[in-house]
Amino acid sequence: MLAVAGTVNVPAQTMLKDDEQFKQWRSMETGPLDFEPASYYYAHHSGHSYLYNGFGLLNHTGKYEPYAYFDYTIFWRGFKTHWDYELVESKSKAVPLSVLRGLYLAEATEEASSMKEMMQKIEHQRDEEVMREADRAVDAAYMVYSKVIEGYKTDIKRICTEAAAKMTIKKQASMTQVFDYILNKYELYNEQFRTIHNTSLLENTRRMQAYEIIKEEFKGLYQYAVVAKNELEIHIRKDELGV
């Protein structure tokens, strides 16, 4: 057997770094903007040649906006003064994605805040409507006014009944129309009282206002009935005395 002896050179694995690609990715992701080769971007992205139209961006007005705008300008450095390419960020469309992400996040946060505020208003209006619906369903004001109004109704009915009996016994008809008027008003106010109690369209605050009006009407009618009763007593007394 033949033994082969020799030396094999194996190159060590090395890390290769592409500066142009590194600057491109850094500019796109985090910034600062720094593109290489500058001459390429000057020629193809800054509008200084006829080729730039294929690499630029059109805004909403149709105007060309260069991705990375470079100028060829003089750098004053004393004895080292020279001409070179300079990136003009104010004229460049390129924006690092980290900046855009921050803007999008701020917009999303503001939109979410506005949506939350709108939903809170809707829920508040819904809760108010539920409360109004519950308020309309329970006539709490009726318990407050029913006893007072029923008291006036009982007194008015009693006065009219006693007056009718006296006018029949004493054959006194001079006050008949007066008590008929009182009874008609009594029926009218009583119907209004029942309507307020039975309706489901009024909230308790409005029911209370309506009950207050009806209570005052019954109070005035009761006072009028008392006056009419006293007037009837006077007429009966005069007939008995033959005056």
Image (cartoon, rainbow, N blue to C red):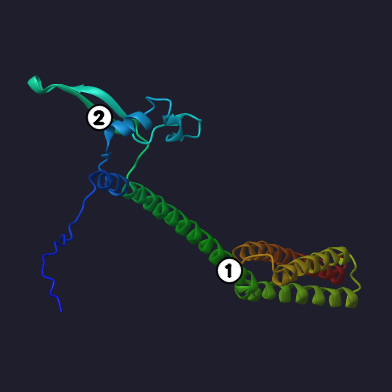
Is 194 above or below relative to 44? below
As drawn, the residue found furthest toward the left would be 79
On residue 223, the disc is none
User: In the rendering, at what x and y percent does residue 107 appear?
Assistant: 41, 50
Which amino acid, by three-letter code, is at mark 2?
Glu
Few, some or many residues within 10 Å of mark 2 (<14, 14–19, 20+): some
Which quarter of the rendering shows the C terminus? bottom right
Residue 212's quadrant in the figure?
bottom right
Q: Mark 2 points at which residue?
A: 86
Residue ranking furthest to the front: 1
Q: In this view, does 223 lie to the left or right of 60?
A: right
- Relative to the observer, which residue lies in front, 158 or 16? 16
The answer to whether residue 207 shows anywhere in this view is yes
Kindly report which numbered mark, 1 or 2, lies closer to the viewer in this rendering: 2
Q: Looking at numbered disc 1 in the image, what kind of residue is underneath it?
A: Val
> In the visual, does 222 lie left or right of 33?
right
Q: Give me the disc on residue 130.
A: 1
Q: In which quarter of the image is residue 113?
A: bottom left
- Horizontal and vertical percent for residue 5? 10, 70
Q: Which of marks 1 and 2 is nearer the N terminus?
A: 2
Q: Do the residues labelled 1 and 2 touch (CB within 8 Å)?
A: no
Kindly tell me whether residue 69 is visible in this rendering.
no
Q: Is mark 1 on a helix, strand or loop?
A: helix
Judged from the image, the secondary structure of the residue bearing numbered disc 2 is: strand
- Judge whether 167 appears above or below 47 on screen: below
Residue 231 horizontal/vertical position (percent): 78, 65
Disc 1 from disc 2: Cα separation: 67 Å
